[in-house]
Amino acid sequence: MRIDAVPLLRCPACAAPVALAGGTADGTGEVAEGQLACQAGHHYPIRRGVPRFVPSQAYSASFGFQWNRFARTQLDSATGRDESYRTFMQKTGVEPVDLSGKMVLDVGCGMGRFVELCARAGARVFGVDLSLAVEAAAANLRAWPNANVFQADLFRLPFPDAAFDLVYGIGVLDHTPDTRAATLALPRLLRPGGTLAIWVYSRHLADRLPHLLSVAYRQVTRRLPPDRLLALCQILDPLGRLHRIPVLGHLTYCLLPVSKHPDPECRILDTFDWYAPQFKWRHTYGEVTAWFREAGLEEIRCLPVPVAVRGKRPEAPPRTPAEPARSAARA
């Protein structure tokens, strides 16, 4: 964590500002070990460069395993591909170059693939994740002084209201116990005119059989130890190549859905990602847009990739000349 991030943090227990109560910054401004505390006496450790605002990974442990095992598999700077860039564009409707100088929050940052894109574009980016994926993210983002990573619960985020120009969550909110509640926890963080963009798994399915079978398989797979499930995904990976064969591939995919990604490492990662999480909800455009309206967002737009939705917090209404006087009279 960079020392200049501390003034922007709030205690998730009482919303009071926090300060560095132990540890010091090195010559680059990085605090590797230490402690944050608020005046009410709540303390939060900083370990391996990451402030820890939660005591455990709770329901997200599979993601901690996943992203530390596949720490650089989807990182564009490591792969030489632009897959993360294209995914970000499709699922947020935001061009990273437009984020220069903006305050950005990545909710559920995983190993930091999208944080890196935004930081490279010149944004000041804060990535949060409930899982130990933050350790992979911190390592991947060490070269970016405008990126910070925190282990925190998105239902109790350590930031003040109206802090960010863009808040996004890509494939994250639907892995919480309650997608609606997770979505409604975010708009308070937007500045007037700020944008919220989320992507969740879609209930709009062209072929329901693979979905129904994967739901049935998940009753077993999400209870397996992560290392055993990963080994199973590696054993089943040849099916990913078979699935790409016309007709035969469709039949095998319907019976045993695994990823069809052309890259073997990505196939195994994707398949693990499908079957490991404790929660994996699917939603419709109608549900998500209703949540956005409930939160008071405007200019709500459904993006072509199901189910990706973005909206804006209304601009602050102009203050009339009489308002300061009325406020003073009430005081």
Image: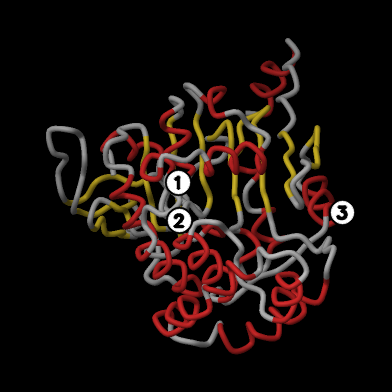
Q: Residue at x 46, y 76 (%)?
A: 234
Give the residue type that dot 1 points to.
Arg
Name the residue beneath numbered marker 2: 110
Left or right position of 96 against 287 = left
Query: Of the numbered discs in the image, which one, if any, rests on residue 286?
Result: 3
CA–CA distance in space, label 1 to label 2: 7 Å
- Residue 286 x, y percent position in the rendering: 87, 54
Residues under numbered marks 1 and 3 in contact, where contact means CB atoms less than 8 Å apart: no
* Real-space Cα separation, disc 3 to disc 2, in angstroms: 27 Å
Mark whose residue sits in front, 1 or 2: 1
* Residue 268 picture location, percent across and down: 49, 68
Q: State which quarter of the image contains the C terminus.
A: top right
> Which residue does the numbered mark 1 point to in the structure image?
113
From the top left corner, tell me how far across and down residue 323 is, in percent.
72, 18
Nearer the N terminus, badge 1 or badge 3? Answer: 1
- Give the class, few, some or many, for how many residues have Cα within 10 Å of label 2's Cα (few <14, many ≥20): many
Q: Is residue 176 above or below residue 220?
A: above
Give the quadrant of residue 217.
Answer: bottom right
Residue drawn at x 39%, y 70% is 65
Q: Residues within 10 Å of mark 3 (few under 14, many from 20)?
A: few
**For marks 3 and 2 on the same chain, the one whose residue lies earlier in the sequence:** 2
**Tags 1 and 2 touching, CB below 8 Å:** yes
Helix, strand or loop at label 1? It is helix
